[in-house]
Amino acid sequence: MHPGEWARRLVAEGHGYLADMEELVEYIGHPRLGYLADGRSVALDSLLAGRVLTHRLTDVEIASDILDAHPDLTPLLPFDDRDPAAGGLRILFRYLDDDVFDERGVDDPGWPTAAALLLGPDALAEFRAGDLVALTFVDGELRLSAAGAPPAPASDLIGALADLVPMDRPEPLDGIVWQLMADDRALFAVPTTPLGDLITNAGYVCDGDDIAVRGFDFAAHRGKEHLAAVAAAHHLTDDETEAVMSFMALIGTLERTPDDEREAAVDAVVASAGDRFAGLARPNAARAAFGEAYATLHAGTETLRLAAAVLRDRGPRRIAPTAHWLAGKAAELDGRTADAERHYERALAVDPNWDEALEALAGFASDRGDAVRAIGLLDRVEGADRESMYDLLQMFLPVDRPDLGRNDRCWCGSGRKYKACHLGKAEHPLEQRAGWLYQKAGSFAQGIAWRSLLLSLAQIRSAHDDHPFALYHALDDPLVADVALFECGAFERFVAERGVLLPADELLLAQQWLLTERSVHEVEAVRPGEGLTLRDVRTGDRLEVTERTASRQLRVGDFFCARVVPAGSTMQIFGGIEPIAPGQRGELIELLDSDATDPEDLVEFLSARFAPPRLVTADGHPMVACTAVFEVSDTAGIRRKLSRRFGAADKDRWTWTEDGSVLGALHLARDTEPWVLEVEAMNEPRFESLIDAVGAADPGARLREQTRTPAAELMAQAQDNGVLPAQPVDPEDPEIATALDEHIRGYEQQWLDEAIPALGGHTPRECAADPTRRDELARLLDSFPQQERPGAMSVRRLREALGL
């Protein structure tokens, strides 16, 4: 089905408007949906059901239980279940999953070159290098087996591939193979020659995820595609695109050519380019050239500086602003702020309205605290008044001081003359300018040198968000920005390179911030709309914090992770507030206390709250509703042995309990002949133990059926059936509050007799009765939120029940 037809069918079935359905089809994230070479969509579950793909094993694959997916197994890559042990697949990439490859003992950093498939441990233990394995999807699960007899010859692919793969461009390999399968139901129905061999024998070649005719120049094609993407992103004309290509040729020549041959090589590039460099005159073309050069620089910014000098000295005069701006960018990347500013000034001397130079100099003026000059520069840039920085600068325009002459001592106490210090600059108190200082550093960290780092952190932050633009939103997330600034070193570099521009009091404040660590804080008092009293859990210090927004939302007893910093006469919070659950505090403090906190680990930990709820049993295993039905014959022996193992039965029902907790149940029931034994447990390790117990009690028992349903799936089914509400309930509703309180009280009684890992596996009642463990119990209760709320256990009631 073509995407447009699919969208129209969704509309016809009443799912929404056509525009919405077209957007849904475009961004749909279902991993089982594939696009065929002819443009239609296909349900891959159905298409691949029963199909067999073969692969020839290597020593590395057998040792690691990881299969190189390219190209033999490429059609399977959408099936990423993340659970190899359950018959699913986990897709690995060398640059993203190095930890998994290391764990599996893969030492070669270049293997595999593309995607790989992670299998369960020892899945390939019975095979040898050179063996053919067959991978088949049956009932939604991947099944791996030996390919058996010599592979059957495949259908004639030469004609089919000729119809699907054009001579002048590559096509996605997976779409081509899916198309072949859709056109021929018999294709890959039995083990055959590996896909890569079939393609080669048919006269085609694969590169990455693409297939093309043998001899096709993939590198040149991808270069053209990349340049087309750059042109589209920067709205370049054909002349500008050619200019960027010529500039990149110059960069390549400067990087590759030895010093003694460089002049002649540059002469050749300039002569070849002719007038094409003129296309770099517009700021958007200059931005594209800089971005491409930065992405490919191997010899450092010196190459960019040399290229800028060539453009300045030998290019047409109209690109002089571009040449000076590129030289300024090279100086900025090297931390030479004064040189960068001079180059930007020279760009404006040639063209007073050159956007990129105006914006760069406005940033320097802002760093100096000169809001008047910064706004004056931005007023010359079209659309700059709509940016958030412009609004921020408006807040810090100076207040006239008619009582001071130009040569009087400045009011700030610096000892300098007013004209050389704060004339025309912000005169706002430092506690107000602290937010401006933070924004200055944030703008610095948005520079190109930090973008790959910000992207990595944003990917981690948005890992649990399925929204199509989740990554884009995460790039603006306060935690991502703050971790980049402090844990990743952007703020330290900002102070080192831009500190010379900052007002003296802001520079001193920035240096104080460098000494302030992120920590876990407990809310001790709240002044809504004004501030908070916090206790730093790591140091015990009490802090009076000015905070208008969060003070309206936080409550006494809440814990959160944040960076609380001095700001003039106040303490303030920058970089967002991350709520922390009671059970997370110890692990987070340990992470923060480590000698070198890994920034990615920190963002991952603090972003775990966005993950779908992970329901676990008391012993920490995922909650899975497991049932099994056995046919048994020796009912007398079953009764005797199960009673010996689990205690006396209640009407042929045995309950497995330990330390007062129910771990599973078995029920002997008279069905139609023969008798059946029903087994139930709420996690898989317990379930396996019960199955072993049944086997020991009756070796002849035959498993009739079993189910294993994750708790999240059960809850989703219940919600679909109307058992659970689709929307959150209001805990303030009197009827709901009463039911909730009744439920919580029952849970509290259960908790008192449950083995708690934090208490060394003892129950709270046992610890309360043991003088040597009572302090440990008291500390655990102290770590719970002390303020009573709907839906939470009452520490007061727990203490009363335990006699504390």
Image (cartoon, helix red, strand yellow):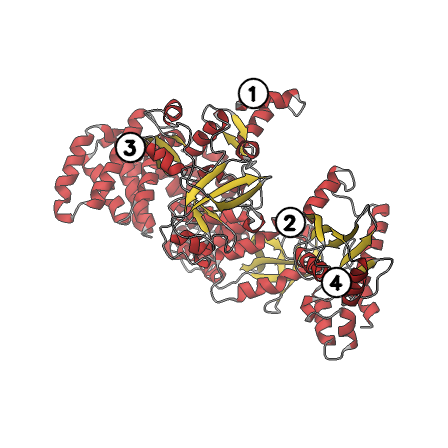
- Confirm or deny contact between disc 3 and disc 1 (CB under 8 A): no
Give the residue at mark 1.
5
**Distance between the alpha carbons at the discs numbered 4 and 2:** 23 Å
Front position among marks 4 and 2: 4
Secondary structure of the residue carrying numbered label 3: loop
Callout 4 environment at 10 Å: few (<14), some (14 to 19), or many (20+)?
A: some
Q: Residue at x 79, y 76 (%)?
A: 769
Give the camera-side residue of 760 and 673: 673
The N terminus: image quadrant:
top right
Compare marks 3 and 4 and give the one earlier in the sequence.
3
Give the camera-side residue of 192 and 221: 192
- At which x and y percent is residue 368? 42, 50
Give the residue at mark 2.
549
In the image: residue 38, left or right of residue 621: left
Quarter of image, res 224 = top left
Compare marks 4 and 2 and give the one earlier in the sequence.
2
- At which x and y percent is residue 795? 78, 64
**Distance between the alpha carbons at the discs numbered 3 and 4:** 68 Å
Q: Amino acid at mark 2?
A: Thr
Give the residue at mark 4.
786
